[in-house]
Image: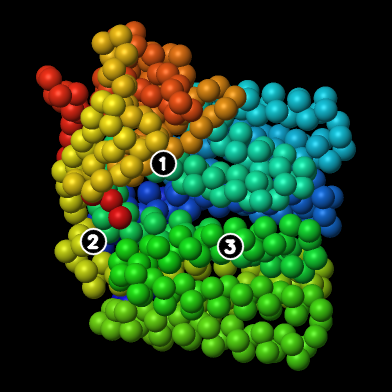
Amino acid sequence: MMRLKGKLALLGLCLVLLMPCAAGAQAVSAREVAAELRVRLDALFGEHALLAVFAMQKRYDGAVDREQAAALLGKNTERLAATLRSAYGEESAKTFEPLWSSHIEALLNYAQAAAAGDKTARAQAANGLEAYAKELALVWARLLPDLGAAGLEAGAKRHNDLVLQALDAYADKNYAAAYKSMREAYAHAVASADLLAVGMAAQSPDRFDASGMKTRKADLRVALGRLLGEHALTAAFAMQKSIDGASDFDQAAAALNENAEDLAAAVASVYGETSGTAFRTVWTSRTRYILDYAKTAASKDASARAIAAGNLEKAQAELAQFFADANPQHGSKPELLNGLTAQTGQMTMAADHDVLGEYAAAYDNMETAYAQMLLMADLLAQGISDQYPDRFPDAPASVRKTVTMQIGEMELTVNGQTIRMDVSPALQEGVVYIPLRVLAEAVGATVSWDAATNTTRLAWDGNQASFPIGSDPAEVNGRVKSAGGAPTIMQDGRVMVPIDVLGEATGWKAELGKDDGSIRLTTTIEERF
C-alpha cells in the first residue's frame, strides 16, 4: 500500500481545491476524480452534521470551549465553499458561504434560546432555518437544475429536523434519543452528498467520468470512510464527555459502540462472520482504551495514563495485525500501524490539550484525527479491492434483482430469499398496494418517517423519494411521479403505496399475475457494497 501515499495526498488536496488539482495531474483520471468527488463530498457533509450537533450541545451547555467548537464547524464551511469555488467559480462560493454560515448561526441561536428557555427566540431560529432550507435549495437548483428545487428543499429541511431533534432530546436529557438523531443526521448528510456528487458529475462530463463513482470499489471506499469518519468524531466527542464527567457520557459511548457494530458488519461482509467477530473484539478494545485514556488524562494520574497509553498501543498493533493476516499480500502491517498510531496520537493529544484548557489546539487535533481516519479508510479500501478485484472492480457491476409477493400473503422473496412481513399487499378499488418500508429495506434503500408531514422518505444509490400519506404524487429527486390518482395510504400502521407509483419512483418493472394475485418486481442495478 505504500505506493498509495502520494496519490492519496494528491487526491485529498484535489477535493479541498477540487478541479484545478485534477487538471494538472495527468496520473489522475476523470474516473478517479469522480470517485474522489463522491468520497470527499460525503466526508465534508458528514463532518458538518456531527460538528453541528456537537457545537449546539456546547452552546446549550454554555461550555468554555463553545467558541472553538463553532470555529471548527466554520472551517468545515470554508472547505465546502472551496469545493463550490473550484467547481462553479467565485460567485457561487460567495452566494453559498454566507448562506451556509447563516444556517449554522441559526442552529447555534436555537441551542442558545433553548438553554435560556426563550420560546420566542427558539421559534425565530426555527423559522430562520426553514427559510434557509428554501434559499439553499434554490442555490443548489441553479447549480444542479436536474435535481429539482423541491427535492433539494426537502433534503435541507430533513437535515434541519434531525439536528434540531438531536438538540431537543439533549435538552430534555433524553440522551439516547439525542445520539440516535445525531447518527441519523450523519447518515442523511452523507446520502445527500451522494446525490449532489452524482448531479455534479453528470453536469460536467468533461471533468468527471461518472462511472468512477458508481463502482463497487467506490462503494467500498464510501462505506469505510463513512463508518471510520463517524468513529473518529464520535470518539472525540465521547472523550470530551469523559473528561468533563458529562451526564450523557454513557450514551455517547453507546453511539460509539453502535458504530463499532456497523464496522464489524462491514468487515464480516468482506472476510466472513468469524473475521467480523475477531475484528469486533480488537476494535472495541481499542475504543475502550481510547476512552480509558481520556478518563486517566482527566484524573491527571500519570501512572494510570501511561498504562492506558500502553494498552492502546497494544490494541493498535493487534488491529494492524488483524488486517495484515486477513490480507497478507496487500495489508501492510507497518503502514497500517503507522497510520493508526498517527491518528490515535491526534486523539490523545486532543484529550491532553482539553484537560489543560488549550481548546484551540484540542480542536485542531480533532480535525486532523478525522482527516487521518479517512486516509486510513482509503488505504483499507485499496488493499481490499486489490485483494478481491472480482468482488470490488473499478468498473460498474450490474446485478438483476427480483422481488416476488402475493396479495394477502405475508411473505416476500428477494432473489429467492424469503422475508416475513407484518402486513400483506392488498387490492383496493382496483389498485394494488404494497408495504413500502419492508420492500424498500429488502432491496437496500434507507427509510425514514417524517411525522410532521406524514411522509415516508427513501434514499438509495444517490436518489431520494418522498411518499406523503393521502397524496397521489410521489416526489423523486425533486420531480413528481404520479399513480393516476391513487394516493399513498396507511394500513395497519404501515405505509402502503400503489405499485404503479413505486415503479415510477424507483424504475422497477412491475408485473401482476392475471389470476393468482402474484406480484413480481424486477430491475437491473449497479451492485453496491
* Mark closer to the chain start, 3 or 2: 3
Residue that lies at the very extreme toward the left in this rendered image: 514
Name the residue tied to disc 1.
446
Q: Look at the numbered disc 1 and give the secondary structure of its residue.
A: strand
Give the Cα separation between the discs numbered 2 and 1. Answer: 22 Å
How would you rate the neighbour count of disc 1 (Cα within 10 Å): few for under 14, some for 14-19, many for 20 or more? some
Q: What residue is rendered at 43% in x and 53% in y?
A: 40
- Give the numbered dot on residue 256: 3
Which corner quadrant of the image does residue 4 belong to?
bottom left
Say which element carries label 2.
loop
Residue corresponding to mark 2 = 392
Query: In which quadrant of the rendered image does the C terminus lie?
Result: bottom left
**Which residue lies at the image location 26% right of the left edge and 38% below the top edge?**
412
How dense is the environment of label 3, judged by Cα within 10 Å: few (below 14), some, or many (20 and up)?
A: many
Q: Position of residue 497 (x, y in %)?
A: 36, 22
- Indicate whether 14 appears above or below 141: below
Q: Note whether residue 76 is visible.
A: no
Q: Position of residue 68 (x, y in %)?
A: 74, 56
Camera sees residue 120: yes
Frontmost of labels 2 and 1 is 1
Give the alpha-carbon distance from disc 3 to disc 1, as whole Å. 21 Å
Residue at 59 percent across and 83 percent down: it is: 312
Q: Are marks 2 and 1 in contact (CB under 8 Å)?
A: no
Three-letter amino acid code at disc 2? Phe
- The answer to whether residue 255 is left or right of residue 15 is right
Identified by mark 3, the residue type is Leu
Residue 191 to residue 409: above or below: below
